[in-house]
Amino acid sequence: MQLRKFEFDSGRLFDQELDVRPLTVLFGANSSGKTTVLEWVEEILTRRDALRFDSADGPGQTYVEGYVWFTLDNADVPGHVENDIDRDLKANLTAGEEGATTIEFGGVLDGSSRGDAIAFIASSLAEQVGAGTDADRRLFAASVASSRDYFAFFSNTHLVIRTDSCSEESIAAATRIANDESGHADVLAETARELVATGSAFVGVVTDGIHEAALRSIFPAVLRFEIEPHLLTGVIENALPQIHDKLFALPENVGEGVHFLDYFPVIHQAETATGHPVEGHSPDSWLEHFVSEGAPEPENHFGGVESAAWLRVRTSLKYAAHVLSEHANTRLPSFVAEHGRIEIQLLPVTLWHTGDSRIRVVFRERNIETGDLSEPRDTAVMGAGTARWVTAAVRLACAELLNGTREFGSDFPLLGCERVADR
């Protein structure tokens, strides 16, 4: 089988076409839609419902409508699976446009060989009363009936004929038939006129859904080699607490006039309003006490707290995420960095139950004219090229911070040291 062309008929790719060859390479800028095209090709071929969606917008997905043009180039090889499929498709042919004069072959050719089916279809098309000489009609009808070109749209598959699959003699015969205005508008004549005018012509429908599964089974396998951005949050969740501890394990006095905060409290054990531990509760090092507005700040962060106190993501952990974001941006190549910035967002505790991660990695695109940054976009829906670079930059930043190779400059006055010590 040879894939020839994809036509997209919905969503962002509405009314777009993609001609394909045994090797097709897509070029384009980051976020220009290359991966979207590949995802839609995969969806048309496999119907796996594997499209991406933005987790911030919910699980709604765009339904893909489109066509795939293909050639059963091994259809004339006896014993080949494409020989059998081509025979079965032709045995179910309804030639002609819907609503016009048609010829139905369904049931007539059951049990016939591919050669017998082609001969019967060619004879039936040629013997209709229509335009052109008998010799031209038989020559062109033989080309139509033996065509190995198809296009599929959902469950309906159609037999087509293309000029680049026809002999010069057959094209000349089709041209004479198309130019003969004395004959009737029969199926063969209409096919000839469309072929001469556009280079390809609809012959008729060959499936109504019965053969779709068998037909799709011979489409080429879809293989995707990706750096998986959705795995990135797990990498960050593992690394961030270690980066945090490395940052705040530095000496309190790191330079003249520069001091760390005296404490960044950890909730080691949940407590009641009276200060008694809650039995069976596991501590969560991501959380700290947060006192509601108007309530007094507890003097001892490790002891009992006021009844008005709540839990929130630790301020120091958010700062560590900021450090990681800034360092990741320095590791982006210039052709990505000029288009925007990485942000590592720690989700509020109230959202932890809505997904698999406490973290969201986003990219805010920069307006080239104004320099303003856009609303954040999840890596799940940004261009795959950008997502790969973001993933690589964040992974590198995690590794460097964990290995103590991050140099701090004026952007981090609180950490007024030249380098995080290796530990």
Image: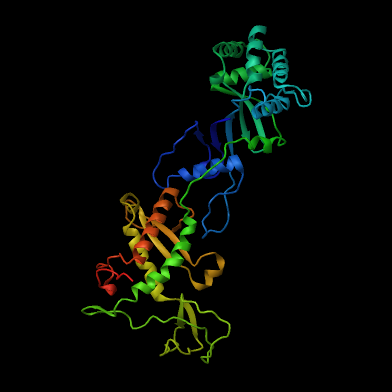
Residue nearer the viewer, 63 or 269:
269
Residue nearer the viewer, 285 or 43:
285
**Residue 197, how many percent across, how many down?**
55, 20
- Residue 71 at least partly seen: yes
204 lies left or right of 300: right
Residue nearer the viewer, 78 or 65:
78
Identify which residue is drawn at 30% across, 65% down: 406
83 lies left or right of 232: right
Identify which residue is drawn at 73% across, 27% down: 92
> Which quadrant of the figure has residue 390?
bottom left
**Location of the N terminus (image quadrant):** top right
280 lies left or right of 259: right
**Location of the C terminus (image quadrant):** bottom left
> Which quadrant of the figure has residue 364?
bottom left
Residue, far front: 423
Q: Is residue 390 above or below residue 223?
A: below
**Residue 325, how many percent across, how many down?**
37, 63
Residue, far left: 256
Residue nearer the viewer, 319 or 174:
319
**Residue 156, how many percent across, how many down?**
67, 34
Total number of numbered discs in the rendering: 0
Q: How is the image coloured?
A: rainbow
- Residue 190 at least partly seen: no
Identify which residue is drawn at 43% across, 52% down: 387
**Residue 327, how many percent across, how many down?**
33, 62
